[in-house]
Image: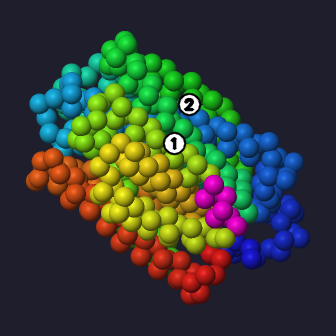
Amino acid sequence: MADIEKQSSSKVSKSSIDSSSSRCPLHPSSPSADCCAAPHMDASSPHRWKAWLTVAGSFFALFCSFGQMVAFGTFQSWYSSNQFSYMSGFKISWIGSLQLWAFFFMGGPVGRIFDAWGPSPLLILGTVISVLSLVFTSVATQYYQYLLAQGILFGLSVALLFYPSVSSVATHFTNYRATAIGIASAGSGFGGVVYPIMLRFLFRKIGFAWGVRVSALLSAVSGAIAASTVSARCTAQKRQFSLRDFQVINDRRFLLLVAGSFFVCLGIFIPYFYISDYTESLGISSDVAFYVLSIMNAGSILGRIAPAWLSDKIGRFNLLCPTAFFSGFICLLLWTFAHNLAAVATFSAIYGFLSGAFVSVVTPCVAQISEMEEIGTRIGALYTFISIPSLTGGPIAGVLLQSKPGSFVAAIAFAGSSMVLGSSFLLASKLSINRHLFHRV
């Protein structure tokens, strides 16, 4: 069965898609001259090299942005033993939570700018801000300076690099959109593996400040590669902003998808923030504990590719719902009873796989129920809506940890139950598309 997607109002037939009347996906009011003549054209087209260059460039963009952001657990562990040893984990976690909030909140504005201007300006600006934020972090001495530099400014840079990259990939692919986005998203999982190991090594060998500056150099190189290779299906044209762009979206399928993602994101990042601290609480040395976060991110690499490919075969919503449910379920089942290194490592690998699958598939699900020309705006809108749970999830877990020092049970229960609840809304979104439970959606 073909992908369930909304077609353009012109209702052109497949045989006429290649005609000069085709519209540009980023600017539907203008004819497509030398680009994107076929909205359903995949990697078999003569322009497939542009599509796969975009996937490769997006891999690098997500490696240095989202991949570094999900490695914040390394900073959390380092801060609790060094700069902010006198602070509670709750207070330190606000730095990482502000990263997530800035990243998600800017989704709407960045997505709208992408639809109007294309990816290049955003990627260049994101690279510059990423480097500056890391340099400022390396010289910061006060808590508020870390909040501004590593929290808000770095989160903004992640938004500027992430959304244009993923949205650009979505414009190049239709039938294998989830697979392509999954390959690009694997960059964040790869970054989540590399950054904890690299940063831990650098902090000990050359100090925190220079270690962060080396990370800034890596971000500059990766961002430059992304800016020079990522392209959308066609060149965006300038458009005037209007109140219509900010009106409340009344698509029931989309609203249920947002609601489900809201609750899932309330808990999905908690393991990434606290798994290293949890491992150390079991009496395992910090030299070993931080590798658990890398194991979790390694699991997410496979989780972003294999399930994404499978979702193109069995349906994207059909995979999104169970990955969200089982992400929460294994927190309640496996993490709660993981009392040794082998059990924690097993949980980390499985959780990384499932949570990576959710992150990879949720974006193609938005694209599937959206008009081609509004993909960037809707993807951004989704992430803007879920900025609130992403901001509060980590600190709420921190408060629960403070309420009973040494016990992670409450925080684990909160994370797991939030994701299970979110999966019920995702299921409702799927059923609003097609009421048959096992239908390919």
Q: Which residue is mark 2?
A: 223
Q: Is residue 337 above or below residue 1?
A: above
Rendered-image quadrant of the N terminus? bottom right
* Residue 84, position as x, y percentages in the image: 18, 29
Q: Which secondary structure lies at badge 1?
A: helix
Rendered-image quadrant of the C terminus? bottom right
Residue 364 numbered tag: none
Q: Which residue is mark 1?
A: 298
Residue at (21, 27) in percent of width and height: 81
Residue at (51, 53) in percent of width and height: 353
* Residue 40, position as x, y percentages in the image: 77, 63
Q: Quadrant of residue 133?
A: top left
Spatial separation of the CA atoms under disc 2 and disc 1? 22 Å
Q: Quadrant of residue 14?
A: bottom right
The magenta-colored residue range is 306-313
Q: Nearer the viewer, residue 1 or 201?
A: 201
| Front: mark 2 or 1 | 1
